[in-house]
Image (cartoon, grey):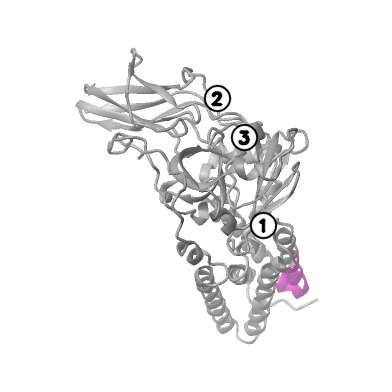
Amino acid sequence: MNTAHPASPRAWAAAGTVAALAGLALGHLAAAATEPRSAPLSALSDLVVARSPAGFTRWAIDTFGTADKPLLVAGLAIGLAAVGALAGLAWRRHPGRGVGVFAACAAIGTAAAVTRPGLGAAAAVPSILAAALAALGLVWWDRRGRAATVTGRRGFLWGAAAVAAAAVGASWWAARVGPAAIEADRESLDLPAPDVPAVEPGPVADFDVQGLAPYRTPNRDFYRIDTAITVPRIDVDAWRLRVHGMVDRELTFTFDDLLGRELIERDITLCCVSNRVGGDLVGNARWLGVSLADLLAEAGPDPAADQLVSRSDDGWTAGSPADLVFDGRDAMIALGMNGRPLPVDHGWPARLVVPGLYGYVSATKWLTELELTTFDAYDAYWITRGWSTPRPVKTASRIDTPRSRSTAGTVVVAGVAWAQHRGIAAVELQIDNREWQLCALSDVATTDTWRQWRFEWDAAPGEHRLTVRATDGDGNVQTSEVQGVAPDGATGLHSVTVAVE
């Protein structure tokens, strides 16, 4: 049995925590220079997301919304810091036990990394390095602390802090100029002009009301919902798109192959099935890409295939009804967004865009595979977690302004409404549960985009309740029945209470 170190248990717990965090920093540096998804926290987070029960996943989305992934990463970091404290306490009495704790962490991190789709044996390196540095840190603490406890402690803390700071700084550098950096490739691409440009919506597509979402959502403001803890960093020169499954011939396309095809440009609104009534998980953009139907037709699809499964570089899958891909709608493999190459966060170098379907069954980012199959043969990612098989996007409307307060007099009430691939035929506003009143509508070119609406309200002082509803292009009025986002999208009418002074 090892003689107890003169430092207190509290000091050993702190030393273990600092050593673990320094190791994590080094692990993330190693990953940033090679494959960011192999970083210990990223790999562990991906594993938790992949293995979480459907009920827990739904609870996390409902409770935390878009903050769920950052909170998961933060929680795991705190947990690993606590494990470091336990390792320090164990080491104080018996170094072998402390080594065992870090070895177990390395094994778990390694297993999480190498089992992630698209990652191989090299993905184990960051977790192994992290555990090794943490263990070496406690070796240093042990030896220096026995010789001179106070001096040893200070030296250890300064040394560990220096290692962690250097690793964090180097990680930041590597992510921008090292192998993991792809922004330079993306920024250097000049997208070709579309062969089939988008039809312009008309002179009044934007009402230009303060607080109203613009007709076309800027890339920086476009919502992002996906399962990626760390965004895939794809070398466009090595990227390939594989078409296979129930086809006459398997095909593979490079990025240049896609750029050389006929390019179509379309304004299309996308929305997430997790968007709550009145929520902002919806946006409209001008997409540039190639026709999905035309590309698949070259592979000779089997008429019996009723599902198109799309796969992401990180292994995520979506299943779209094949008949909706081939029914004439502007389903596309998008390469550009609002006149620029796809942002990395939104799927660079290629993603799917299918008008009229929620993103969880269509909008695959970082696209690498298209497989024609059947719904009986395969369940995609969210279907295995309790969400519905594909359903059309539900008719929805939202009040953007005012949201809470206003002044008496003429007040412009405005918002957006959407029913992709059916379009919006009318929007009505109700004030204080009185009769519904028609709103003015903006110009649109197709049924695949949202539509702005506005109403001039003679607002009297007091508290007022405003409610909006839309009618789609098929004549169906938006339902007032309240349903949560699961399993196939929220329903209900958006209302706000406005205090008028």
Quarter of image, res 56: top right
282 vs 268, nearest the viewer: 268
- Please tell me the numbered disc located at residue 483: 2
The quarter of the displayed image where residue 328 is located: top right
Q: Earlier in the sequence, mark 3 or mark 2?
A: 3
Residue 348 seen: no
Q: Which residues are magenta?
A: 89-104
In terms of sequence position, does the residue under pointer 2 or pointer 1 come before the other?
A: 1
For the question of whether residue 263 can be seen, the reply is yes
Which one is closest to the eye, mark 3 or mark 2? 3
Q: Quadrant of the C terminus?
A: top left
Q: Residue at x 54, y 45 (%)?
A: 225
Three-letter amino acid code at the position of disc 2: Gln
User: Would you call the spot at circle 2 few (<14 residues within 10 Å), some (14-19), or many (20 or more)?
Assistant: some
Read off the residue under disc 1: 44
Q: Which mark is residue 439?
A: none
Q: Quadrant of the N terminus?
A: bottom right
Q: Main SS of the magenta segment?
A: helix
